Image (cartoon, helix red, strand yellow):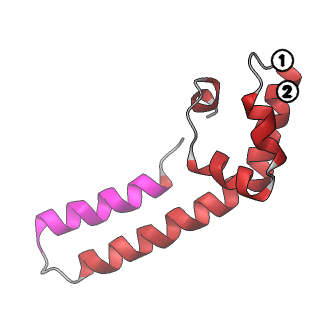
């Protein structure tokens, strides 16, 4: 789940954790994290970033589903509805 973090990729949960805990930004600037440093960053993301990122994803999913419902019933619409729902529920 945190492979992006190891590769220096800022995901939405990480960005939201930084917004809630600005000191996290300084930790991220340090090169070559120790296992303890990495685990502390992961813990901060889990505590401060996962839930708000999930809530935002749910908001946009709901908006997408509502928009798709406006289209006439078709196989394409049904597939898009299923795909949209699956993307939010997928295993990370």
Q: Residue at x 42, y 67 (%)?
A: 61
Q: Position of residue 65 (x, y in %)?
A: 34, 73
Which of the 4 image quadrants contains residue 40? top right
Magenta span: 74-88
Mark 1 sits on what residue? 34
In the image: residue 60, left or right of residue 16: left
Q: Residue furthest right?
A: 36
Q: How many discs appear?
A: 2
Mark 2 sits on what residue? 37
Classify 10 Å Cα crowding around label 1: few (below 14), some (14-19), many (20 and above): few
Q: Quadrant of the C terminus?
A: top right
In the image: residue 79, left or right of residue 48: left
Q: Residue at x 31, y 56 (%)?
A: 83
Asked if residue 73 is positioned above or below residue 42 in the image, the reply reads below
Q: Position of residue 24 (x, y in %)?
A: 80, 42
Classify 10 Å Cα crowding around label 2: few (below 14), some (14-19), many (20 and above): some
Q: Secondary structure at mark 1?
A: loop
Q: Secondary structure at mark 2?
A: helix
Q: Residue at x 28, y 78 (%)?
A: 67
Query: Tags 2 and 1 in contact by the CB under 8 Å rule?
Result: yes
As measured in the structure, the alpha-carbon distance from the residue carrying label 2 to the one carrying label 1 is: 5 Å
Res 66 label: none
Q: Position of residue 9 (x, y in %)?
A: 55, 33
């Amino acid at each position: 789940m945190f492979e992006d973090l190891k590769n220096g990729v800022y995901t939405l949960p990480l960005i939201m954790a930084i917004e809630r805990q600005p000191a996290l930004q300084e930790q991220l600037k340090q090169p070559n994290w120790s296992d303890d440093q990495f685990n502390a960053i992961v813990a901060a993301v889990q505590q401060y970033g996962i839930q708000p990122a999930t809530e935002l994803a749910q908001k946009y999913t709901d908006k997408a589903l509502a928009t798709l419902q406006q289209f006439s019933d078709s196989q394409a619409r049904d597939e898009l509805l299923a795909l949209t729902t699956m993307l939010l529920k997928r295993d990370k």
